Amino acid sequence: MERLRDAVAEGRLDMDEFEERLEAAYKSRTYAELEPLTRDLPPVPGALPLGAVPATGPTPGGAPWPGRIGGSGTSSTAVAVMSGFQRKGRWTVPAHFNAVAFWGGGELDLREADFAERAVVITCVAIMGGIQITVPPGVEVDVRGIGIMGAFDQSGAQTAPQPGAPRVIVNGLAFWGGVEVRTKAPKGSKPLDGGGYRKEL
């Protein structure tokens, strides 16, 4: 997908070809289905052959930041009414995500997530409920929410934003409820130079 984006930026593909190939890439299930999509494009210097796995590479969701930004959001809304919701593991955070907790709770874990855009906005409404958002170190977080007999809290060790890392803007309203944004590395992981994490076995 990165090669297709580079190709359209360089004028090697027009928008119709780009969209057609991108859609085919999302539907692909094997490397054999992906190979024809970039066969006529020049190779990326230093890139591994398609399907090759680096000996000490990152796990899915732990790739360096440029490889984790772009694409379509997995879902754009989560609602908990006297119940709960959870988004964690490998998912794609859309440019705008809405989370609502009314007499309930929700968890958004972004540590292994991809991001549709470099800057994403998460709007939280917590009414007599709570929402917890977990981001990995290196991600810039901007908390702008309003608390009325409630609070928007940010916890965890704050680190300098990593080059190319996404920016997460959290806004909304907490009324007799709370929204907590915490910074925490993925469990059992080790930071990579280009951003992201590698699982330690």
Image: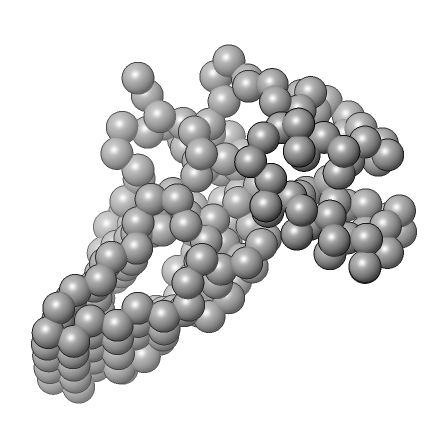
Query: In this orientation, which residue lies closer to the viewer: 116 or 65?
Result: 116
- Give the number of marks: 0
In this view, the residue farthest toward the top is 55
Q: Is residue 171 visible?
A: yes
Task: Give percent across and percent down for residue 144.
Answer: 35, 75
Residue 86 placement, left or right of 128:
right
Task: Give percent across and percent down for residue 11.
Answer: 89, 51
Residue lying at 55% horizontally and 36% vertically, measured from the top left: 29
Residue lying at 59% horizontally and 53% vertically, measured from the top left: 70
Task: Give percent across and percent down for residue 130.
Answer: 16, 69
Residue 86 placement, left or right of 114:
left
Residue 153 placement, left or right of 93:
left
Query: In this orientation, which residue lies closer to the viewer: 176 or 48?
Result: 48
Q: Is residue 9 above or below residue 198?
A: below
Q: Is residue 37 above or below residue 85?
A: above
Task: Give percent across and percent down for residue 39.
Answer: 81, 31
State which quarter of the image contains the C terminus.
Answer: top left
Q: Is residue 192 above or below residue 129?
A: above
Q: Is residue 160 visible?
A: no
Residue lying at 58% horizontally and 54% vertically, measured from the top left: 71
Tell me the quarter of the picture where residue 2 sits: top right
Residue 34 placement, left or right of 138:
right
Residue lying at 53% horizontally and 45% vertically, measured from the top left: 68
State which quarter of the image contains the N terminus.
Answer: top right
| Colour logic | one colour
Query: In this orientation, which residue lies closer to the viewer: 8 or 21?
Result: 21
In this view, the residue farthest toward the right is 11
Tell me the quarter of the picture where residue 27 sits: top right
Query: In this orientation, which residue lies closer to the viewer: 162 or 103?
Result: 103
